[in-house]
Image (spheres, rainbow, N blue to C red):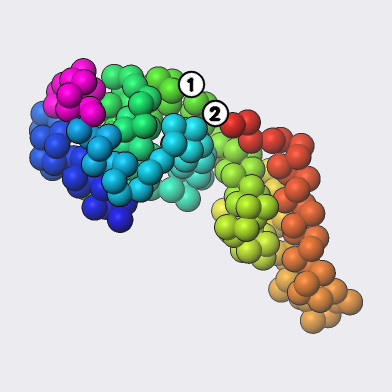
Amino acid sequence: MMKQRYRAVQDLLGGPTFAGRRHRVAECAASNEKQARCRDIWSTMIPVKPAEALARMRDAAALWSVGYASGADLVDAACDLLITGHDGPNLSMLAGVHSRHADEEVPELLEAALQDVGLDYHSPCSEGGQEAAVRTMAARVLAGALEPLDLATWAHTTIGHGTLALAEHLVELDDVYDTLEYTNMTEQDLNAEILAEARRIVGAHPLVEP
């Protein structure tokens, strides 16, 4: 459904070819009539509220910084922002990137696009990006979108031991799962502890609604 929506809007912006894309997207952003038509296409497929679009971009940017989101994910998020009324020349340029070229084009456009909408940029492999990604994934557990054990496994494989204080206990809890049969804990006990750790992470570093 997202690809269908993306292609419909991209067609309206001038076709899939990247050559001349930035100019065409800028023209679209400046044209009230065409922007209204873009919004009509978008809203008939999956309605997205402006605040939800900002939160999606914030989370996607954080996960991208640790290699857990693709350039195409950020292009999709930029399209959501543009169509829900957010604006900016750099955001429009990002929204106009073809998914085929996203991994090459997005890194040079992302920081400025995030500035257009007041979101923080985290460079790849940065500590700030890792912390933001951990908060994002912990919030997904609390929202019921991710299983507790999956959070611990993600933290272990993505962050690892001795890398980030915020994630260290999650990484340790993933180790516990590997040796669970030799402990007095059950899988339910472990899930409960991971859930409590997710609450601690989000509570200590709450995700502020954009």
Q: Which mark is residue 19?
A: none
Within 10 Å of the Cα at label 2, are there few (<14), some (14-19), or many (20+) other Cα atoms? Answer: some
Query: In the drawing, does residue 142 fall left or right of residue 114?
Result: right
> Decide: marks 2, 1 in contact (CB < 8 A)?
yes
Q: Quadrant of residue 87?
A: top left
In the rendered view, does 5 fall on the left or right side of 146? left
Residue that carries the numbered disc 1 in the rendered image: 118
Highlighted range, magenta? 22-36
Front residue of 197/55: it is 55
Q: Residues within 10 Å of mark 1 (few under 14, many from 20)?
A: few
Residue type beneath disc 1: Gly
Q: Which residue is mark 2?
A: 210
Residue 165 is at least partly visible in this image: no
The span from disc 2 to disc 1 (Cα, nearest Å) is: 8 Å
Question: What x and y, as percent, mark residue 29?
Answer: 23, 22
Counting residues from the N terminus, which is met first, the one under dot 2 or under dot 1? Answer: 1
- Amino acid type, residue under disc 2 in the picture: Pro
Residue furthest out toward the right: 184
Would you say 176 lies left or right of 159 here?
A: right
Asked if residue 120 shows in the view, the reply is yes
Q: Which residue is pictured at 76% across the width and 40% down the height?
A: 203
Q: Is residue 170 magenta?
A: no
**Mark 2 or mark 1: which is in front?**
2
Q: Nearer the viewer, residue 179 or 35?
A: 35
Would residue 35 be counted in the magenta stretch? Answer: yes
Q: Quadrant of the N terminus?
A: bottom left
Please identify the quadrant where the C terminus is shown.
top right
